[in-house]
Image: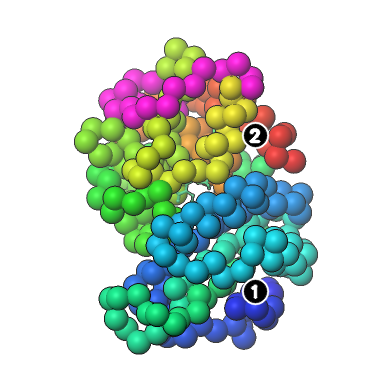
Amino acid sequence: RTVYVNGEYLPETEATVSIFDRGFLMADGVYEVTTVLDGKLIDFDGHAKRLSRSLNELEMKEPCTQDELLEIHRKLVEANNVTEGLVYLQVTRGAADRDFAYPKDAEPTLVLFTQEKVLAQSPVAKTGISVISIPDIRWGRRDIKTVQLLYPSMGKMAAKAAGADDAWMVEDGSVTEGTSNNAYIVKDGVIITRNLSNDILHGITRAAVLRFAQEAQMQVEERPFTIEEAKAADEAFVTSATTFVMPVVKIDDAAIGTGEVGPIASRLREIYIEESR
Ligand code: PDD
């Protein structure tokens, strides 16, 4: 693969980052994952805007302009012949002597690479996934897309150990989000998903799906929902750049609705893929 590091396109084996990089030492960095479908980027603008916001919240420099970022994304997709998959982008505060205070003169590190992945025809979407519930013990700024992903990784491992696919995180009785996706339930035809705040990542797929749902005259309620409400829901699903709309058919030991993929989740998945192509 060809990857991008700080202005250069290189074979992945020749790409390097300093051992003093604060992303490596302190998870002092942010990231974005943009999907590629039919060789085209989905929602690039949304991802670029959220990146700017994450950088701004952490007082980090923009490594380049949005147009330059788009150019890098396109070049990598082309160089690696990606028709379906993703572009991963990471910006860190850069390399400096280890110190908790931000360095004054560090230049941001910008890294991008591509990964091929079957997305639209994912067989899992036909059967749905199962999730376990775990406490949300992450920090209070989940709206910033930082590379501190150890707890979500632990959640994923706990899910696998329990024979499930993923985990939904619960705080004060309500579901915040999945390990790497936004969470939804459907009750009596109403799509319910947690409102935006610092408690969750402001998903780019979430914004698109809610817009498509409203255009299709579906009813949407943005509010926290409890894990009990979720277990008693008619349908459940998650959204993210790499899963699109993914039905959830089981939460802990409770089958959701009929225990099979529901009509609203599958319709939204179809619409999302159609509209994104
Ligand atoms: N994850 N919530 C969390 C905690 C996430 O990590 C993600 C995305 C989302 C969905 O956001 P979006 O729709 O913009 O992808 C919600 C990416 C895909 C990842 O970490 O791989």
The residues tagged by marks 1 and 2 sit, at their Cα atoms, a distance apart of 29 Å
Residue 240 lies in the magenta-colored region: no
Residue 227 lies in the magenta-colored region: yes
Residue at image point 23% right, 33% down: 173
Residue at image point 60% right, 77% down: 5
**What's the image's color scheme?**
rainbow
Look at mark 1 in the image and give the residue it sits on.
3
Q: Residues within 10 Å of mark 1 (few under 14, many from 20)?
A: many
Quadrant in the picture for the N terminus? bottom right
Q: Residues within 10 Å of mark 2 (few under 14, many from 20)?
A: some
Left or right of 61? Residue 130 is left
Look at mark 2 in the image and give the residue it sits on.
272
Q: What percent of the width, then of the height, locates residue 138?
A: 29, 52
**Region in magenta:** 215-236
Quadrant in the picture for the C terminus? top right
User: Above or below — where is 260 with respect to 22?
Assistant: above
Left or right of 94? Residue 152 is left
Residue at image point 69% right, 75% down: 2
Residue furthest left in the image: 172
Q: Amino acid at mark 2?
A: Tyr
**Quarter of image, res 13:** bottom right
User: Is residue 166 shown to the viewer in this render?
Assistant: no
